[in-house]
Image (cartoon, rainbow, N blue to C red):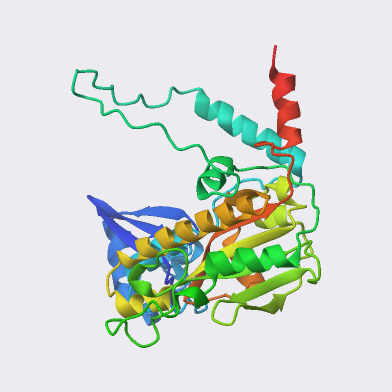
């Protein structure tokens, strides 16, 4: 008999809460059950099929009859608990198509809106409370300001193929190790940490990596590819899954014809190597955010619209990227392509019109 490796125990007088953070289940144990669990943690071989408590602990998944493999994570248990505990968003029913997603999402929004949102902090209107700022500059067509202003999240894509040259530009400027900065070094930079991207990275580790989901790119076969920033190349990882991308991405089927997407993952082993503290987990999330924004701005400058999400099936995505039980884990997804510019898909707009009096 084995103790489930995905347990977190919280002391709650007069007993304790055993939280299975992988399956999102909790069990409240009284003194008798807590004492027996402590004995079994000390020596799992004490398990007794004739002991009612033992069999109930087994049925609850606190004990397991076979050993469960856990990701190769390293020393940092706190971030491991957080990462695994936030995987695979619990969902009673995953939408099978865009119509089901639209109705489910609209119902969720209506439920949320039934309660007033928290009020803003009252604005101090005293004579010295506000500082006037100058008017923003008028952007040029090819300026960074223009890309910042035009960037928007869209949920309606035409499926038109993306030129391979645009994909190369996107990946190089978002994730590539910039050749233009190779001379931007000094003796203070450690060997192996001299590569520079357009986005900042905690400790210069470049802990985040990218996997490209190709559905419609000119001159590139559909499939999933790993991007190699030092060489500015792609390597084939897997064919496209049999199911539509919406099944991977939380039932958001409006992106089923998205021509190009990027999964941003994090190499936690690189972070733990330099930063022996759980706070380093935050740096992975921040770096993924930097890369996502850079990707979107470059895509916007190239004339495409973008979409992004953190909602996906971790298990399925890890399998697709061949990252099962790895210290590298997917964190975010961003995609781009030709769009009609609509922030919401047509199916949701139709539902909203039906709801209007």
Left or right: where does residue 173 sit relative to residue 201?
right
Left or right: where does residue 297 sit relative to residue 163?
left
Q: Residue at x 57, y 75 (%)?
A: 324
Q: Confirm whether residue 317 shows in the render.
A: no
Left or right: where does residue 25 sit relative to residue 147?
left
Q: Is residue 272 above or below residue 218?
A: below
Q: Quadrant of residue 82?
A: bottom left
> Furthest-top residue in view?
357
Q: Residue at x 40, y 31 (%)?
A: 135
Please identify the quadrant where the N terminus is shown.
bottom left
Q: Is residue 166 above or below residue 348?
A: below
Please identify the quadrant where the C terminus is shown.
top right
Task: Pinpoint residue 312: horizontal percent, then vertical percent.
Answer: 60, 56
Task: Pinpoint residue 165: horizontal percent, then vertical percent.
Answer: 71, 67
Left or right: where does residue 78 sit relative to residue 117?
left
Q: Quadrant of residue 222?
A: bottom right
Q: Residue at x 42, y 60 (%)?
A: 285
Q: Residue at x 61, y 52 (%)?
A: 301
Q: Is residue 308 above or below residue 53?
A: above
Task: Pinpoint residue 224: horizontal percent, then vertical percent.
Answer: 70, 71
Is 29 or 133 nearer to us in this picture?
A: 133
Q: Confirm whether residue 270 shows in the render.
A: yes
Is 354 or 25 nearer to us in this picture?
A: 354
Q: Quadrant of residue 206?
A: bottom left
């Amino acid at each position: 008999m084995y103790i489930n490796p995905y347990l977190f125990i919280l002391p709650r007088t007069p007993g304790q809460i055993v939280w299975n953070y992988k399956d999102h289940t909790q069990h409240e144990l009284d003194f008798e059950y807590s004492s027996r669990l402590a004995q079994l943690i000390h020596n799992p071989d004490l398990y007794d099929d004739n002991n009612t408590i033992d069999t109930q602990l087994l049925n609850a998944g606190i004990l397991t009859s076979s050993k469960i493999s856990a990701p190769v994570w390293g020393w940092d248990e706190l971030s491991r608990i957080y990462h695994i505990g936030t995987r695979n968003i619990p969902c009673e029913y995953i939408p099978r198509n865009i119509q089901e997603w639209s109705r489910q999402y609209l119902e969720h929004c209506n439920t949320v809106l039934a309660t007033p949102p928290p009020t803003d902090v009252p604005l101090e209107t005293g004579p010295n409370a506000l500082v006037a700022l100058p008017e923003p500059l008028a952007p040029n067509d090819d300026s960074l300001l223009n890309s910042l202003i035009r960037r928007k999240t869209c949920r309606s894509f035409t499926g038109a193929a993306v030129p391979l040259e645009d994909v190369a530009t996107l990946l190089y400027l978002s994730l590539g190790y910039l050749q233009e900065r190779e001379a931007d070094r000094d003796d203070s930079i450690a060997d192996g940490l001299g590569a520079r991207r357009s986005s900042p990275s905690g400790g210069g580790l470049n802990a985040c990596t990218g996997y490209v989901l190709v559905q419609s790119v000119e001159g590139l076969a559909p499939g999933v590819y790993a991007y190699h920033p030092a060489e500015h190349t792609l390597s084939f990882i897997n064919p496209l899954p049999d199911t539509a991308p919406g099944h991977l991405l939380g039932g958001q089927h409006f992106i089923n014809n998205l021509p190009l997407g990027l999964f941003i993952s994090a190499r936690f082993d690189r972070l733990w190597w330099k930063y022996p503290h759980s706070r380093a987990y935050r740096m992975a999330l921040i770096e993924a955010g930097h890369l996502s924004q850079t990707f979107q701005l470059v895509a916007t400058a190239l004339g495409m619209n973008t979409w992004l999400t953190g909602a996906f099936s971790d298990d399925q995505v890890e399998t697709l990227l061949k990252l099962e039980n790895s210290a590298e884990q997917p964190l975010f997804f961003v995609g781009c392509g030709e769009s009609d510019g609509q922030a919401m898909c047509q199916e949701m707009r139709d539902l909203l019109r039906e709801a209007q009096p």
